[in-house]
Image (cartoon, rainbow, N blue to C red):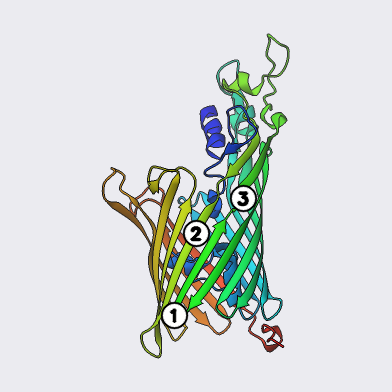
Amino acid sequence: MRRLFVSSLIALGVAASPASAQKLAKYGADFLAGGAGGRALGMGAGVAVTNDVSAGYWNAAGLSGTQYPELAYLHAERFAGAVSFDYAAASYPLSHRSTLGLSYFRSGVNGIVNTLDAWDTERDQPKPNYESFTKTFDAADQAFFVTYARQLRPNLSVGVTGKLVRRSIGDFAQAWGYSADLGATYRLGRVRLGVNLQDITGMFQGWTVNEEAFNTNTATNPDTGQPYTFEETFGQALPEGGTFIVPPVARLGAGYDLPLTQDIGVTLGADLDLAFDGADRYAFNTGGMSFHPRLGTEVSYKGVVAFRAGLNRIEPGSDGSGVSFSPVLGAGLTLQQFSLDYGFGDFAGLASELGQTHRISARLILQQPRFVRPSEE
């Protein structure tokens, strides 16, 4: 029981090594990697093709494609329901060229059992009726985005997103982080190009550890006359905080709109993430840069019904040969101002024990004359 508790804390991101001035945190923002918006998630690609309220995540410049205020919400259960993910966003056209967007993300594991005070150190086993000595806590990652987009030309837009991150593991450890994204979109006929420089300066996260929260074992050490410390109880050093940096990622995208008939249209999308994390396993790489491609397509009928499919992850095979794929599927229904989108994805193959993810998102467009984007005077 005690090993399980300690392992859970480590797995949730509390470092047990001595703190240094700054450390590289390759996975410090992974809770945001799942994406936002049912349309892009169902396609597998979104950097260039996203032009709705969820562009605050994919590419800030894409907000210039909105003509009315928009609201969106998405919920997903990951890892067979162990992790819940929620996303909400809003956008508002400020002028004929400018748009403001707000986004909120929360990814959390709820009801984790705290067994610190349930272990009898002297007997080296759980206390009698140990359930009465246990409590629960939540581990949650939250992010707040503020996005501003500006249309420079009819076919060129730019945008910037300021990001504030709050991470917590019960009362044991907390962190604040911040960074910024820069984005641009360019349209050339039916071709759309996009670039999003994610965490352009690196995302800084400062962790602090509450030592008192760990030292809850009320039993007294007969040698010291003081309550047992965390190290005496669990045989390992107390985790320490520090400053961590999440490296930047350059996200490139391309899209192509192909009208097949008057009622049927096809959109093709492709993304390529260039990560400076030094990853050399399960990713195409050269030097200190790794490459993460994604492909997707959408077929729509009269702008009401849409079917989507894509490859969310394309990477080298686990045995070092060949290529493995992770598919995504999706569908969408738009009724006047309201859209409902569904996306299906998996983490490591359809037969993986990590389970599949079903994502449902809703979007509301306040399509009323008084809310329309102001025209150029």
Lateral position of residue 167 relative to residue 85, left or right:
right
Question: CA gap, disc 2 to disc 1?
Answer: 21 Å
Residue 377 rendering spot, x and y as whole percentages: 72, 88
Q: 171 and 219: which one is in front?
A: 171
Kind of residue at badge 1: Arg
Residue designated by label 3 = 201
- Is residue 170 visible to the viewer in this orientation of the structure? no
Q: Earlier in the sequence, mark 2 or mark 1?
A: 1
Question: CA gap, disc 3 to disc 1?
Answer: 33 Å
Residue 96 rendering spot, x and y as whole percentages: 68, 81
Residue 345 position by quadrant: bottom left
Residue designated by label 1 = 190
Secondary structure of the residue carrying numbered label 3: loop
- Is residue 245 visible to the viewer in this orientation of the structure? yes
Kind of residue at badge 2: Arg
Question: CA gap, disc 3 to disc 2?
Answer: 14 Å
What numbered label is drawn on residue 255?
A: none
Secondary structure of the residue carrying numbered label 2: strand
Residue 140 rendering spot, x and y as whole percentages: 61, 48
Residue 275 rendering spot, x and y as whole percentages: 48, 50
Residue designated by label 2 = 251
Kind of residue at badge 3: Thr
Is mark 3 in CB contact (under 8 Å) with mark 2?
A: no
